[in-house]
Amino acid sequence: EKLFRLFLFKFFIMSLEEEIKKRRTFGIISHPDAGKTTLTEKLLLFGGAINEAGAVKSNKIKKTAASDFMEIERQRGISVSTSVLAFNFKDKKINILDTPGHKDFAEDTYRTLTAVDSVIVVIDVAKGVEEQTEKLVEVCRMRQIPIIIFINKLDREGKDAFDLLDEVEKKLGLTVTPLSFPIGMGLNFKGIYNVWKKNIKIYQNDQKQIIGNKTTFNSLNDPELESIIGKKNIKNLKEELELIDGVYPSFEKNSYLNGDLHPVFFGSALNNYGVEDLLECFIEIAPFPLPKQSEKRIVEPKEEKFTGFIFKIHANMDPNHRNRLAFVKIVSGTFKRNTSYLHVRNNKNLKFSAPNTFFAEKKEIIEVSYPGDIVGLHDSGNFKIGDTLTSGESLNFIGIPNFSPEHFRYINNKNPMKAKQLEKGINQLMDEGIAQLFVLNLNGRKIIGTVGALQFDVIQYRLLNEYGAQCEYENINIYKACWVDGDKDCSSMDDFIRKKQKYLASDKKGKLVYLSDSEFTLKMAQQNYSDLKFHFTSEF
Ligand code: GDP
């Protein structure tokens, strides 16, 4: 019997490992309008997960008006699964995690990045590296997340390909290696040379596609190829390929996986061109679910026992279904329906009868999920971003910090009859990670800090509509919030606390936060109290 059990155990571990190796969980990031939604849609087409283009609901918030946001959220409330788009391609299970492009939701995107194993960055060939791309890539670089770059809209006139590669290196601080290279662009766009597979695909936009025509060539010397794209283009391409060979490091999977080397692809998402090359390479090189650091130890995906963490909470804007959906990334073991798991922060066992999985845009109830997968759990207010669930072990994952907010306002109660509702509403919205609450040490006044200004309207609207509470804001002059710590019995901490009393607050965990009123005073404080540490994320 012992042998049989050992056999079962081995079988279990082996199939778990196989499931892990199949999975690719990633995010697509870009500045708004670079083509993230379009690319996502085409990827889903390849997976056969959707049948026609235009099926992916865009989560774009173009105008910075809260009403637009609310409208989008209401629509999304019905189809929250846009947060995860899963599909199968060849023998791989691919999970795309949606990241909002709007800068006011950058924190949501940062947190989603804690749950991805790699990213694809989309860049508009005409606009090059834009502001939002820079910020997001910086977060990826800090975490050494493997990055692939997709330069999009080659059917339009844009910057020279080499100039763009330069720009990516300089502005994003990445070391690039082109794995594909365009032949012309805009009206003269002829095709793409695939450095990875060493072949050429002739460009045909969606309308022009003629079935049966030869479109892929394996040799640059094929006379038919010359007749299609012209002698001059072939000569240029040959020179360019020599240059690429001489100037850029050749692709090495390990360097990419370590975050030291970044492959670049070119294409046109709208015309579904260059996307397949990207996807084919992606499934081969992108990492499968990686180990994750917890406070105690590193957790390996192939461990038998389940662990996972919550990286996103989606409120349901539909007034008839008020509960929230908490998104869990599975780190290790298997997650099963109707099984009791430990919610570590509350030290409480929870069982889920209807955990959701996602396929394309559909949400289904799942029996079992594996590392890399995202599971949606219905939640009536237990969860907070960053919470850990386990099979019983008391551990907490780290690396899901709050970021130092940049906009601040006092929040006041407008209707004294609804104080309780307001309190509950604020607490729950903060748990969702919309904004951060700071309580002034001096007088207990509440201050909301956000990454974007749009959030204030969102909070006000949701407090009223979901909790029946009314709030009003009052301006406050704060430049930046940062977390301060120092050695326990360091005398300058006492001094700091005495002198800066007016500017000190506690965050939700009771950590000391310094709300500096200007860049200058912050700098001075950092200088005058050089043995204290000033942190710009809540995790240190
Ligand atoms: P997102 O904001 O990054 O999600 O961008 P979208 O995918 O919504 O694309 C923004 C706009 O660019 C839309 O009008 C798309 O149709 C267009 N677009 C996307 N890809 C391409 C492309 O390859 N070529 C051209 N010409 N337009 C594109």
Image (tube, helix red, strand yellow):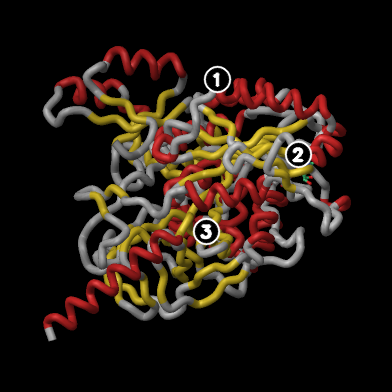
Disc nearest the viewer among 1 and 2? 2
**Residue 440 located left or right of residue 51:** left
- Residue under the image location 21 percent in, 63 percent down: 393
Q: Judge whether 78 appears above or below 53 on screen.
A: below
Quadrant where the C terminus is found in the figure: top left
The image shows residue 427 at horizontal and vertical percentages of 43, 55
Where does residue 274 sit, x and y in percent of width and height?
Answer: 69, 45
Q: Closer to the N terminus: mark 1 or mark 2?
A: 2
Q: Earlier in the sequence, mark 3 or mark 1?
A: 3
Which residue bears the numbered disc 2?
Answer: 222
State the quadrant of the N terminus.
bottom left
Mark 3 and mark 2 residues within 8 Å of each other at the beta carbon: no
Q: What amino acid is found at the position of numbered circle 3 in the picture?
A: Asn
Q: Is residue 523 above or below residue 89?
A: above
Q: Secondary structure at mark 1?
A: helix
Give the residue number, with chain letter if any, for mark 1.
247
Between marks 3 and 1 in the image, the one whose residue lies nearer the viewer: 1
Q: Are marks 3 and 1 in contact (CB under 8 Å)?
A: no
Q: Nearer the viewer, residue 469 or 52?
A: 52
Residue 517 higher or lower than 425, as above or below: above
Task: Identify which residue, 82 or 91, lies in the foreground.
Answer: 91
